[in-house]
Image: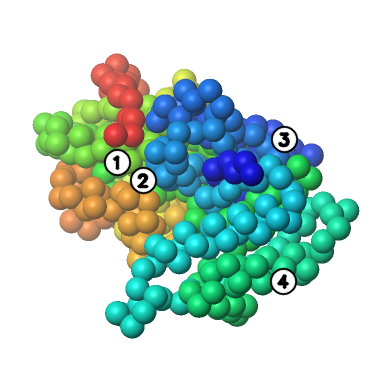
Amino acid sequence: MIINDILIVRHGEVALKGINKPYFEKALLRRINSEAEKIGATGAPDFKAERSDGLVIVRGYAPELRETLAKRILKIFGVATVSYAWELCSREMDDIREAAVLWIRRIVEGRGMDCGSGPAMTSFKIAGKRSDKSYPVTSPEMSADVGGFVLEALGERVRVDVVNPDVKLYIHLRMNAVLIYDNSLEGFGGLPLGTNGKGLVLLSGGIDSPVASWMMAKRGMLIEAVHFHSYPYTSKRAEEKVMELAGIVASYVGKINVHIFNLLPMQEAIAANCPEDEMTLLVRRAMMKIATIVGEQVSANVLITGENLGQVASQTAEALVVTDDATTFPVMRPLIAMDKVDIMDKAQEIGTYETSIQPYEDCCTVFLPKHPRTRPHLENILRSEAQIENYEEIIKEIMAGEVIQIAKPE
Ligand code: ATP
Ligand code: MG
C-alpha cells in the first residue's frame, strides 16, 4: 500500500468565488509555492502544490520540512485550514482499514500510560465521506466497518465515542484516492495577496497601524508603507522599531517597501505660523499630502490608516473630515469601529504587540499641543494652513529626503 504524506489546504472564502474562483486559486497556489521555495521545499523532485476538486493538496516535500511548511502556509491569507494527512493511492477497503489502524495506533502509542494505572484508553470516531458516489460502500457503512476493524485491531486501548472523541478520523473517499486526517489547524482566512489592489499604509510605531495593514492585506491587498519621523527629535531607534513592525507584517505578505520621510521642517513651519491647538490636525494633513504623492508614484488605489473613531483628538468625526480633505485617495480605516482592547488582542495574535508597546517617541508627540482641537472646522484649518507661505516648497524639501527601506520577515 502506498501512503503519501500530504498537506490538505482549504481555502474558505475563495471557495465562494464563483466564476472568478480559478483566479483566486491560482493566486493562492503562487503564494504556497513561494513560501515553500523560501524553506527549500520546492527543491524535492516530487514537490507539488495543486488544486484538486475544491482543495489544494501539497505533496512531495522532505518529511522534516512538513511542520515548518504547514506553519508558513497557515500564515498565507486565503487559507482557512490546513490538515496533516495521508493520501492512499488504493481505494480498497482492506487498505483503508489498515491505514486507519496505523493512524490511530500511532496516536495511542504517543499517549503512553494513564497515571500508572495501565495504558490510556483513546476514544475515537471514524467519519467517512465520499465524493465518489458510485463507490459501493456508503459513508455510514464505511465508518462502521473501519471503526469495527480498529476496535478489533487495537483492543482495550481504544473505544468508540461518537459525541466527544479524542480522535475524529476522517476518511475521505475521492475519485482517485483516499484522504485520511484527523484535526485541522486554523488559518486566518481572507483572500490571497494581490487579488485586491494596492494600499499605501501610513505606518507609525504604534499599536494600530500595523494591525490596520495586516487587516487590509488579509483582504488580498498589496501593502506599501510611508513612515514619518522628526529626527533628531525622534531617535534612530524609533525608526528601527517601525522597520521591525513592518518586518512582522511582512512575514504574512513577503516584503514591504517603507518610504521614510523627515517631517520636521513642516512641523516647525506649522508651530511657527499656526494656532497651537491645530498642530496635530495640520501635521496629519501634511502626512496625508505626502502619502498622496507617494501613493500616486507607486500606483496605490487607496491610503490606509490605523485611525479609530474617538480614540484621540485627531480621530473625531470632524477631525477625520479635515484629514480626508488632504488627499484625493479613498482612505481605508479598517479599525474605525473597533474597541481598543480588541485591537490590542489582534496585535497580540498577529505578533506586533510586544514591539508596538516599546516606549519610543513618535513624531506626533513632538510639538504636541496641550489642548488639541477636537471639533475642527475645515475652513478654519485651511485658513491656518494658508499661513504657511512656502508650504509646497517644504513638501518638496521633505520629499527630496525620501529614504526607501525594504522590510523583510526575519
Ligand atoms: P498608531 O497606534 O497606529 O500609532 P495612534 O492611535 O497613535 O495610531 P495617531 O498617532 O493619531 O493614532 O495616528 C493615527 C494614524 O496616523 C496612525 O494609525 C497611522 O496610520 C498614521 N500615523 C501616525 N503617526 C504616523 C507616523 N509617524 N508615520 C506614518 N503614519 C503615522
Ligand atoms: Mg501613533
Q: Residues within 10 Å of mark 2 (few under 14, many from 20)?
A: many
Q: Residue at x 56, y 27 (%)?
A: 46
Q: Are marks 4 and 3 in contact (CB under 8 Å)?
A: no
In-front residue for pair 207/177: 177
Colour mode? rainbow
- Please state if 87 lies on the left or on the right of 295 as rendered: right
- Judging by the rendered image, the residue that carries numbered circle 4 is 144
Question: How far is disc 1 from disc 4 in space, using C-alphas?
Answer: 52 Å
Question: Which label lies toward us, 4 or 2?
Answer: 4
Q: Which mark is residue 210?
A: 2
Name which of mark 4 and mark 3 comes first in the sequence. 3
* Residue type highlighted by circle 4: Ala
Nearest-to-viewer mark from 3 and 2: 3
- Give the residue at the far top of this rendering: 400
Q: CA distance from mark 1 to mark 2?
A: 7 Å
Q: Residue at x 35, y 73 (%)?
A: 113
Residue 394 x %, y %: 28, 23
The label shown at residue 245 is 1
Which residue shows up at 60% across the image and 72% down it? Answer: 151
* Mark in front: 1 vs 3: 3
As displayed, is residue 230 above or below residue 347? above
Instruction: Judge left or right: residue 19 versus residue 376.
Output: right
First along the sequence among labels 4 and 2: 4
Is tag 3's residue or tag 2's residue first in the polypeptide sequence?
Answer: 3
Q: Is mark 2 within 8 Å of ligand 1?
A: yes
Looking at the picture, which amino acid does disc 2 mark? Pro
Separation of marks 4 and 2 at Cα, in angstroms: 50 Å
- Secondary structure at badge 3 equals helix
Tell whether 385 sits left or right of 230.
right
> Which residue is identified by label 3?
22
Mark yes or no: residue 8 visible.
no
Coordinates of residue 22 in the picture (x, y in percent): 72, 35
